[in-house]
Image: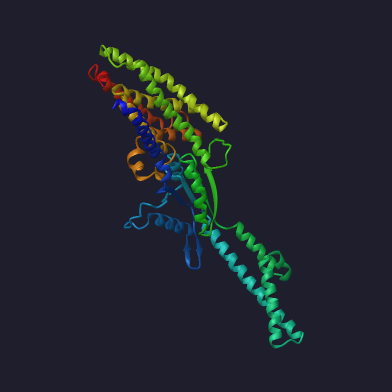
Amino acid sequence: MKQYAKYVLPLVTIIAVSCLMALMFYPMMNAQVRELPVAVLSLDEGATTAQGEVNVGDAMVKKLTEASAGDSSSADADEQPMVWTKVASQEELDKGFVDHDYYAATVIPKDFTAKQMAVKQAAAKAQIESATALAQTMAKAQAEAAGQGLTGAAAQQYVQAAMQKAIAAQSGGATGAAASGTSDSAGASASSDDENAPAVTLTIDNSKSPLVASLLKQSVPTMLSQTGVKVEVKTINAGDVKSNSSLPTAAMMGQNVLIMPTYMMSLIVAVLTVMQLGRKHYDSKPQRWVSFGVQLCAALVWSLCVALGACCIFAMLGSVWPPAAMIGFLWLASFAVMSVMLALMNIAMPLGAICGVLGLGLGMTSGLFPYELLPGFWRDWVYGWVPQRYIGDGVRAVLYSGDGWWNAASEPLMIVMCVGLVVFIVAGLLPLGKRGRE
């Protein structure tokens, strides 16, 4: 075996690295938008017409929510790109944004129906005025044809030419004003209708996922405009993240240069710490506990260096230093990762190394992509426990929401750190010499 190991080892390395790369990039290459939670709020007060009370906003909400619900008996019922959820008030919507329950929300104003009725009435009035102007033009052309002594086909051609000229003048706006006395008022009415067209506000939360925010900015206004309404887009939690690139993927990669270096450097430092400060054999259990304490103290110092290194990478690539709170958050994240890796490696070095590499492969995309974009396996078995997911949440909270080092992702990372300390205790209770025999 030793004779052929030098030939087999490169092949094994190639296979292992290929599998790792496949794990890292498979979710990215197979991402699909599924069930993005989007809120819709109608403040529309409705309007009274000859047919009774009309509320276009409520009808729009019903249409959106029913379309996203789909047919419950369909196999594709859970594959809708967006799930529209009706909220009852502005206060409820604001709370949903604070809790990051929604990626975006569409708010229908209180005068939505009234404006739509006004636009329809103005359009009907413009049509009547246009038809009246054409009728007057026809009568005038017929009188002129008779005055010139034209009859039969000649008179008909004269009237048709006059009508075509009038129609072209009306469609030409300003040109129509010279052809008809009523065309100017019709053009002004059309301009007024465009200004008074019903508009809804699309609010997008950039901090929940800049990638999804970019997708929603492109797709939702197009979808809503098909219903005949204007869409005013507003972005919240835009942050102060600057990039030299105009591509939306630059923001995503900006997060990645904080997430992945933090994890990778923490894993590498944990391996080096165990190799330098750990021992294969312990003479007594107190000696083992002292070694564990020294490793954790070293990890506490090195994790701060990891946080500073990740921020330096971000500054060098993004031309801006991240907020000071980022250092504190990444310090916590790095120490949490190191505590788990150190504990596993103190039980068995191969165990810790394998878990660390698997975490790297499985968790890379989970730190960047939200739950709704990941393939089924990552959604069900990976997203809930990989630390990159929580590191990504915390990075976005600091960069875009302006949160401090203690944010929504800090508590899960504290749990990760506690898990590492528990595994340390398990490693300390193992019989002496077990790690040496392995």
Residue 74: x, y in percent?
33, 57
Residue 288: x, y in percent?
29, 15
* Image quarter (top left, top right, bottom left or bottom right) of the C terminus: top left
Question: What residue is shown at x 61% (from left), y 70% (from top)?
Answer: 127
Q: Nearer the viewer, residue 20 or 172?
A: 20
Q: Furthest residue to the left? A: 431
165 lies above or below 392:
below
* Image quarter (top left, top right, bottom left or bottom right) of the N terminus: top left
Residue 130: x, y in percent?
64, 71
The image quadrant that residue 352 belongs to is: top left
Q: In this view, does 69 lie to the left or right of 311?
A: left
Q: Furthest residue to the right? A: 148
Question: What residue is shown at x 36% (from left), y 24% (from top)?
Answer: 339
Residue 278 seen in this snapshot: yes
Total tally of numbered discs in the picture: 0
Q: Nearer the viewer, residue 30 or 152?
A: 30
Q: Nearer the viewer, residue 297 or 92?
A: 297
